[in-house]
Amino acid sequence: MMPNPDLDSIVPNIKFFVDNGAVGIMQQGTQAGTGTEFVSLRMWVLAKAMWNSELDGQKLISEFLEGFYGPAAPAVQKYIDIMHSYGRQNDYHLGRVARMNMPFLQPSIIAEAEAALRQAHAAAGDDETLQRRLRHAHLPIWYILAKRGPMSPTWKAVEDKVGKLDFSEIARLSIQTGKEWQVSAVADPEESGPWFKWLADYAALLKEKGQVLPPEFNGHLPDNCRLIQARQIDGIYLNRTGQWREMDDASDGWALTILKPGWLIQHTFSPYDEYTIGRQYKLFVRLKGGPTKADGTACTVGLTGTGKLPSRNISTAELAGDSFKVFEVGAFAAQETVTLYFALSRDGLMPEVYFDCMWLQQVD
């Protein structure tokens, strides 16, 4: 569902295969689910280039935009150029899996992207067919805004560019677009249903409370803390190891239920949005345990990066009980790439652990 700026490489990649003797190519342009980012544009370019690999990729994109978005085409092209700007200006390889720490998702780029898409909506006027298509083009940016949240640097950067944002409106439009385009997945292999339900619930909580915080903050998030809800983590491999569950005592009403051992729950922190490289931070997680089979290690949570970073084994005794508890994982210096990992013990002493949220507290 998130932006995936690889449009510059589609035709050159196909041409590379053809020039090197390939007689057939299996393209997987929308493998993760229906309604993925720019799916119509991607299918158009892939089909045309596989028929004739000598065609100009940028001309194909322009032809599609003019026919599909009409008077809004120039603004959509501007949006595409903004999202591809980092890759065009830097020696950068996107790779197969994009995470929330990617440099093309830094706040200033998302702010420019939102402004361009608003220009596209304005150019389309009252044409509902075009507006429907533009909502789909807009969905990845709404997704990033919701994942980062109203207390994030990204949210502030966008508001500085276009004016005040309304999470309820972002949620409403995202849910509407999901239905219009039958969007079935957030990512590979995460289904979209719980995401859209969380959007509606979180919007309602924000409207009621102003901020959605765990009770440990007593209604006020300190300036030196960056809170990340479970629904706002990267979410890699969630369907293989856990499931989303509505829980009344979770800070936002939702928790990630960890059901299998293995390092499959991960979150790579963004140096553009979640911490500043070189600064010192402490990591805290808010967890609750399920039924206990025996005493011992229930789960492990820690960080990976360069050098020795903190980790913590949490026992079944520490997690026992019917309430969420906060655990300090440890202090670390922020690097360009730091990834949180979370796994159940392979002993299976606590078959379920519930992950509510985490936060980074700057300490220097």
Image (cartoon, rainbow, N blue to C red):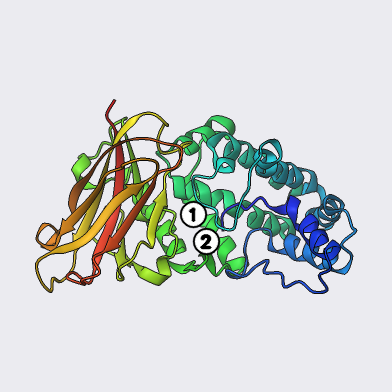
Image side of residue 135 versus residue 256, left or right: right
| Residue 233: image location, x then y, percent | 40, 53
Instruction: Please give the name of the residue rendered at 31% of the width and 57% of the height, measured from the top-left corner.
Output: 342
Quadrant in the picture for residue 354: bottom left
| Residue 116: image location, x then y, percent | 68, 40
Q: Is residue 272 above or below residue 70?
A: above
Image side of residue 180 versus residue 190, left or right: right
| Residue 98: image location, x then y, percent | 55, 53
Query: From this viewpoint, is residue 203 visible?
Result: no
- Image quadrant holding the C terminus, namely top left
Residue 175, which numbered label? Answer: 2
- Image quadrant holding the N terminus, namely bottom right
| Residue 64: image location, x then y, percent | 82, 57
Do callouts 1 and 2 mark residues in contact (Cβ within 8 Å)? Answer: yes
**Count of residue discs:** 2
Quadrant in the picture for residue 296: bottom left
Instruction: Please give the name of the residue rendered at 9% of the width and 67% of the height, measured from the top-left corner.
Output: 295
Secondary structure under tag 1 reads: helix
Query: From this viewpoint, is residue 67 visible?
Result: yes
- Reading the image, the residue beneath label 1 is 171
Look at label 1 and name its amino acid. Ala
Image side of residue 50 versus residue 358, left or right: right
Residue 239, which numbered label? Answer: none
Instruction: Please give the name of the residue rendered at 28% of the width and 58% of the height, measured from the top-left corner.
Output: 355
Q: How far apart are the alpha carbons under marks 1 and 2?
A: 6 Å
Image side of residue 93 versus residue 144, left or right: right
Label 1 environment density (alpha carbons within 10 Å; few <14, some 14–19, many ≥20): many
Look at label 2 and name its amino acid. Ile
Label 2 environment density (alpha carbons within 10 Å; few <14, some 14–19, many ≥20): many
